[in-house]
Image (cartoon, coloured by chain):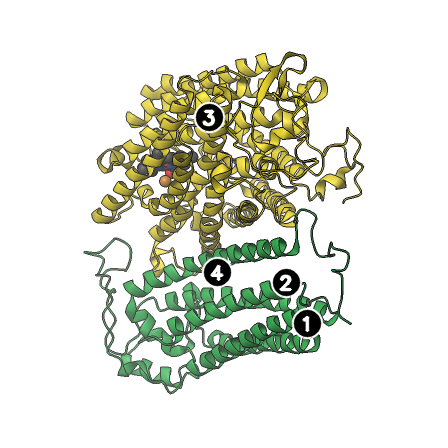
Amino acid sequence: MSTAATTPDSNYLNVTKGALSWLLTLDHKRIGILYLVSILSSFFLGGMMAMLIRTELLTPGDTIMTADQYNQVFTLHGAIMIFLFIIPGIPAALGNFVLPLMLGAKDVAFPRLNLMSWWLWITGAFIAVASILINAVDTGWTFYTPYSTTTGTSVTLIVTGVFILGFSSILTGLNFIVTIHKLRPKGMTWFKMPLLLWGLYSTAIIQVLATPVLGITLLLLAMERVMGIGIFDAALGGDPVLFQHFFWFYSHPAVYIMILPAMGVISELISVFSRKHIFGYKFIAFSSIAIAVFSFLVWGHHMFTSGQSELVNMIFSALTFSVSIPSAIKVFNWLATMYKGRIQLDTPMLYALSFLFLFTIGGLTGLFLATLATDIHLHDTYFIVAHFHYVMFGGTVIAFLGGLHYWWPKMTGKMYNEKLGRIASVILFVGFNVTFFTQFVMGSRGMPRRYFHYQEQFTSLNQLSSVGSYIMAVAFFMIAGYLLHSLAKGRKAPANPWGANSLEWHTPSPPPFDNFDREMRGVDPYDYTGWKYDESIEGYVPVGGGDGTRDSRAV
Amino acid sequence: MTDSHGSEGHPAHLQHHFDNSRQQFSASKLGMWLFLATEILLFAGLFVAYAVYRSNHPEIFIYAHYFLDTKLGGINTMVLLLSSFTMAWGVRAAQLGQRKLLVALLSLTLLGGFGFLGIKYVEYEAKWKHGLLWGTNYNPESHDDHTGADEHAEEVEEAPTAPETGAPDRLNLEPTVVPPSATGPAGTVPPGEGLPHGQGAEPDNVHIFFGIYFLMTGLHGIHVLVGMSLIFWILLKSIGGAYGPKYFTPVDLVGLYWHLVDLIWIFLFPLLYLIH
Ligand code: HEM
Ligand SMILES: [Cu+2]
């Protein structure tokens, strides 16, 4: 491990060669890349399913598939996107890569668990995909009983896959918590950490505490199918609604597993590209923890129409309202950070701005749903579909793309085509709103979700929504195109292309195997005064000279 | 005799990304505690299921628990407690570098695990024989023929799994708290069958108790097995003298795991066997 050659050009990408040196690597950066490739493949698969859904919905009734196939396709779209892509997305791919770098550390606390997490992901993903080939599930990603215990599709298999994926997620979370506690460098107190780390930390808490409950839920579901234990079976004295409680006790916190790291990414992007110190650091940090705590107390808002008592409904409604407060605190602090900043509209910043816009819509429509009276009307309509796409896609996926563009130079050592980047992000923004804003309209007019057939009056809105999804597909192919192109032909990336100050920008792009050639100390990650732009390398260099990857004080 | 790999300033067990052994140890320990938290939450799901069904159907639990053998359960509790003790002592022995003692204590702990599983096997087998199982598999052979309450009581006494503790006819069963379905949530009970047939009679859906019983003790049993494999692994390594005052992390962590397994049983035993 330590025999790696340390010539000046040696970096984590070229230090060892061969497939096994990747598949069995303990280096957090390579594991991050493995995860990145894996989740992007899932995203592609899930995206194909989405295209099939939208194409089917071009006309009422049978367009390109049967009703049963439609049920399978939307189930797989949801399950793949959620369990394979968006939950591991930011933490396991981007987080794995940057978390130790931001800490000035050599690796995460448990590199072997980290590798195991990826292999578990692969195993779980393989089983889940196998279940598609065998007899694709048609229950919706929520696996609600009693349908999931009676359908003939391979529920048990996919549930096994998701169970294993849960393990993988727990290991990532556990690793991050310990790493942040134990491997912070000298001078980096909790409140000098980049805010992404607060986001990842609070995410990790949820991963560790909520995922086991999903595990037991899925285990019970499998037992119900395999052995007929009857816990969720009303005919045997069991309670199907209990399944919903169990499921949402995990899956509501899980939506914060998705959004908290995204918010962390946005905190970094907004500050760096406004060239201004982040506003309200502590508010943003604590609101992440507050969200993590509250997230465990609101699951009942998914069951307002499932026959909960009115009192319980009211309590969950009130708690749901309160969880939006910390989210709003963040949004206000980001706006305040931009206020009077020197805003630079690089691609990552365009994504950050999209995020602000879309997440705000998504969050506010959540309040419509948290209101008992309106939820009766909106529950299980396209309004829900639009709501969660605004937060999950408009929030998490957009932030993920922002982060991907932001750290791409660090990960690959290559710059992508900035102009294409900006164009694609705008196309995506437009396509997104065409697709999903339309769904708010349809939902509020009463079009139910998960329906294969719809009434004639919804035809034109559905077609508009489908056209939006094709626009997004164009943007995604563009992004894939210029990113891949940059790997082969991209300009060499400077150590610090954006003038950021968190520690990952204090080492070359791509970083050497050991991350840093010196012992790092904590710095104020949002103080940009020490960097100035250098035309010749199209990147930032320290005001005091040098290229920032060496610190004369420490030598 | 003792392994002295701490001599060059960079002990062999120290991974390259840690500054020193202490940092590595405290990281491992924190990781283990977090892992234990996930285990507790895994079981928490079952405890919640238990709480929900017990509060909705107390009569099922009171009736069914007489089929569990308190004596065997009690012995098993002692066995696990003792093995936890030998485990804790083993950690101490590792810290003090007492290799032989460590090996002896780990072997005893392992033995405790085998004892526990053996007794559990006896219990399971009896349930299996009498059809005291979950869901649709619940089919107590003596209950095939639903005729009268008295007959039931007698047969229960005969069943070897319901020993001297008392036959259900001595019970004053409280009626289920779930009202008949005409007024209660639809689907919970078939109309008119929501109440027990009478004193000493078998309430509806007794299988729910056995479902929960097998889930909880089964999942716990799997954890016992995992714990035993881990103990076996550190036993092998300690025979080779891998642990001493400078490095005993695995013994410490496996110990924590074993205590958790013990602790969960401490909750399972009264909740399942000692219901009043
Ligand atoms: C600002 C705070 C938010 C509030 C007040 C809120 C509120 C709600 C409510 C009340 C529902 C249930 C509606 C129903 O089924 O009738 C819901 C559904 C949902 N929300 Fe949110 N939400 C918020 C943020 C988020 C975020 C950040 C995400 C994900 C990143 C998210 C993802 C979802 C999903 C996936 C569903 C639907 C799940 C399904 O039934 O398939 N929400 N939201
Ligand atoms: Cu929710």
Q: Residues within 10 Å of mark 3 (few under 14, many from 20)?
A: some
Question: Which chain hosts label 2?
Answer: B
Tell me the kind of residue under disc 1.
Gly
Chain ID at mark 1: B
Tell me, yes or no, whether the two marked residues, 2 and 4, touch with CB atoms within 8 Å: no
Residues under numbered marks 3 and 2 in contact, where contact means CB atoms less than 8 Å apart: no
> What hue does chain A carry in this figure?
yellow
Quick one: SS at disc 1?
loop
**B252 w.r.t. A461: above or below:** below
Classify the position of the C terminus of chain A by image quarter.
top right
Q: Chain of mark 3?
A: A
Say left or right for A238 vs A520. Answer: left
Which chain is drawn using green?
Answer: B
Label 1 to label 3: alpha-carbon separation: 53 Å
Q: Which residue is mark 1?
A: B97
| Quadrant where ligand 2 appears | top left
Q: Is residue A111 visible?
A: yes
Q: Position of residue A32 (x, y in %)?
A: 62, 37
- Residue labelled with disc 4: A227
Query: How dense is the environment of label 2, judged by Cα within 10 Å: few (below 14), some, or many (20 and up)?
Result: many
Which quadrant of the structure image shows residue B191? bottom left
Mark 3: secondary structure: loop
